[in-house]
Amino acid sequence: MTDYRVAPGEAQEDQVTAAIEKVTAQIPSSVYLGAAIASILGSVAFKIAKKENEALFVGQWVAPFLILGLYNKMVKQHGSDATSGK
């Protein structure tokens, strides 16, 4: 059976990705968590105001903010082009 897994250092990200990660790595992870919590509160506020569509729209932002926070944390800890297991 063939092993198709990518080994550390085998593939590299392009310079655009590296530039974006260099800038976004400066953002504290708590910003993404705060944005997710603000989305939850905003969704609840719209729900209370009986604006169902807006509540669903804003409520759907929670997961992307949390995923972006996880990605940000992983880039800070491991880098996007990790070549060694530090």
Image (cartoon, helix red, strand yellow):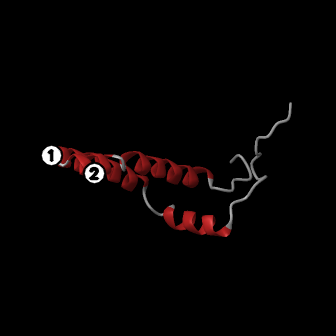
Q: Residue 26 in the image: x percent, y percent?
A: 48, 64
Q: Residue 18 in the image: x percent, y percent?
A: 62, 65
Q: Which residue in the rendered view is the most extreme toward the right? A: 1
Residue ID at (36%, 47%): 62
Residue ID at (74%, 53%): 83
Which mark's residue is nearer the viewer, 2 or 1? 1
Residue ID at (34%, 53%): 35
Give the side of residue 34 with respect to residue 71, left or right: left
- Determine which residue is flagged by label 2: 38
Q: Nearer the viewer, residue 17 or 8?
A: 17
- Determine which residue is flagged by label 1: 50
Give the side of residue 2 with respect to residue 50, left or right: right
Provide the secondary structure element on which disc 2 rests. helix
Q: Is disc 2 surrounded by few (<14), some (14 to 19) or many (20+) residues within 10 Å?
A: some
Q: Quadrant of residue 80?
A: bottom right
Give the side of residue 63 with respect to residue 5, left or right: left
In space, the residues marked 2 and 1 are separated at their CA atoms by 18 Å
Residue ID at (76%, 45%): 6
Kind of residue sitting beneath label 1: Lys
Q: Which residue in the rendered view is the most extreme toward the front? A: 53
Q: Quadrant of the N terminus?
A: top right
Q: Nearer the viewer, residue 52 or 8?
A: 52
Q: Do callouts 2 and 1 mark residues in contact (Cβ within 8 Å)? A: no
Kind of residue sitting beneath label 2: Ala
Q: Which residue in the rendered view is the most extreme toward the top? A: 1
Provide the secondary structure element on which disc 1 rests. loop
Q: Residue 59 in the image: x percent, y percent?
A: 31, 46
* Residue 73, numbered label: none
